[in-house]
Amino acid sequence: MTTFDLTSSLDINSNLAIVVAQKEDKLTVLSPIDADFSAAVTQALTTLDFSAKPLSTAVIVNPVDPTKIVIAVGQCTEHETESLRHMAGVASRAAHGRDSLTLCFPHETAAQAGAIIEGAQLGAYVFDAYKKPAKKPVAHVVVVSEHTDEEIRDHALVLAEAVNAIRDLENTTPNYLNPVTFAQHAKDIAEAAGLAVKVYDEKDLEAEKLAGLLQVGRGSASAPRLVRVEYKPENAEGFTALIGKGITFDTGGYSLKPSGSITEMKTDMTGAATVLHAVIAAANLGIKRHVVAWLCLAENMVSGTAGRPDDVIVYRNGISVEINNTDAEGRLVMADGLIMGVEENPDEIIDIATLTGAQMVALGNRTTGIMGTDDVRDAVVAAADRAGEPAWGMPLPAELRSSLDSDCADMKNSGSRYGGMLVAGLFLKEFVGQTPWAHIDIAGPSFNRESAWGYQPKGATGVMLRTLVEHLAR
């Protein structure tokens, strides 16, 4: 794992990352560096025809030490902290294989210094469980800043390492990560963090009448699990319940996914991984809020015991649901978590899931959709903005609810394909009653299917962890 230090003094005889931009058609070094050094760097970059487009990079020999390099990063200005994360991320990735890197980026606040550390740690991420990387991540990073308090570094690393832990879980393949092994992993790491954990096995699920988990998980050799993780500090200010979808692999069930869509369905457990690491991060940061995370874990498989279209299930709160689409399984297991969470009377409840392909149709692959009651929805959107994570508040139009009407049950589990993200939100709304609530759909942003960009690698992203922690801290 990459280690970090903050320092107020710059050693230019190092592997160095700096920020550059085009100013009046001339390359300009924006980092606070000696003028002669800047001039030598600018000349070398001009020779290379470096454009300095946002987040572009160029690597040159350090003018004062030919055994070292200088990584020039094109300035990004979209967000006061997120831009720094992305610039640090591309610099850190460009330094793979190096023993050290010094980041000299212009910034003013302690929050910006922390963002540079976060971005560098996120950019250094490599998932190497099954494949040896061509180059190891940079071993040590020094961030040049006027803000050198170790608490800045430690806070940033709690967040970045939580995001990377989510990425690890999401990238883990389903022959290793199933509901049983996930539940055990969650129990082990949460208890190690000093949190209270209860795992509901299949007998407990039957006893508690958790119909959604039982229905979705009945076709798998790995039985479903519900995991409750609690962080309750002294003098806690408020109580938040977090619900995470944890489908460790989703075939679609008898509403079978086509071959082009079934790959990457190992990622369908990202919501559960996110709430797990959100509550652990809250504990590690000492946030003064009571938090309970519910991990709804199942594997949606096809077999002789699998649930069928036309089945009707009845939840512990009495709501009956007709299954008209076994590939709309996430909302079925999330309903159990919402019911259990609401029964504990939290001040608010927030669920997060890779729930609908409609989210990607509406908002693309990088912007998260957030629905719910106005107050909590807007608060989570605001937290996302502060954290620098793209998100957009979405409505829950009442007229779409009728598409969930059933002839034989209180409702169906799947409705209109038009506004499908919103229809899924309306389904979940039926299980929260009067509790203030937000639903977060990360179907697209949770997994980067293209090449690495900014601090995001190809593959799992760990999106919205920082947003949830930011929200809990406020």
Image: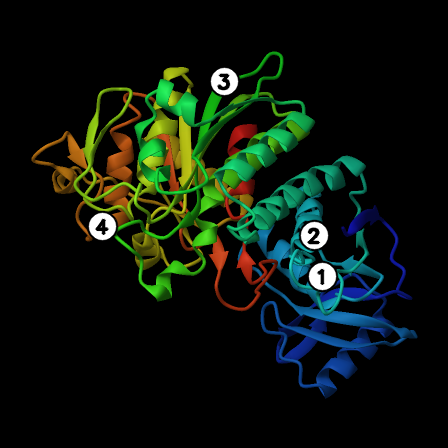
Which of the marked residues, 4 or 3, is nearer the chain's N terminus? 3
Q: Position of residue 156 (x, y in %)?
A: 69, 42
Q: 440 or 474: which is nearer to us? A: 440
Judge depth for marks 2 and 3 and give the one in front: 2
Residue 246, placed above or below residue 237: below
Badge 2 crowding class, 10 Å Cα cut-off, few under 14, some 14 to 19, many 20 or more, is: many
What amino acid type is highlighted by mark number 3?
Gly
| Residue annotated with mark 2 | 121
The residue positioned 84% from the left and 66% from the top of the image is: 15
- Amino acid identity at mark 4: Gly
What amino acid type is highlighted by mark number 1? Ser
Left or right of 116? Residue 462 is left
Most foreground residue, 50 or 118 = 118
Element at label 2: helix
Label 1 Cα crowd, 10 Å radius (few <14 / some 14-19 / many 20+): many
- Residue denoted by label 4: 419
Q: Is residue 162 above or below residue 121?
A: above
Q: Is residue 176 above or below residue 101?
A: above
Contact flag, marks 3 and 1 (Cβ < 8 Å): no
**Residue 243, horizontal then vertical, whole percent:** 43, 32
Secondary element at image label 3: loop
Cα–Cα span, label 2 and label 4: 37 Å
State how many labels appear. 4
For numbered disc 1, what is the local secondary structure? Answer: helix
The residue under label 3 is: 238
Seen from this angle, which residue lies furthest front? 304
Residue position for label 1: 92
Q: Mark 3 or mark 1: name the one nearer the start of the chain.
A: 1
Q: Give the secondary structure at mark 4.
A: loop
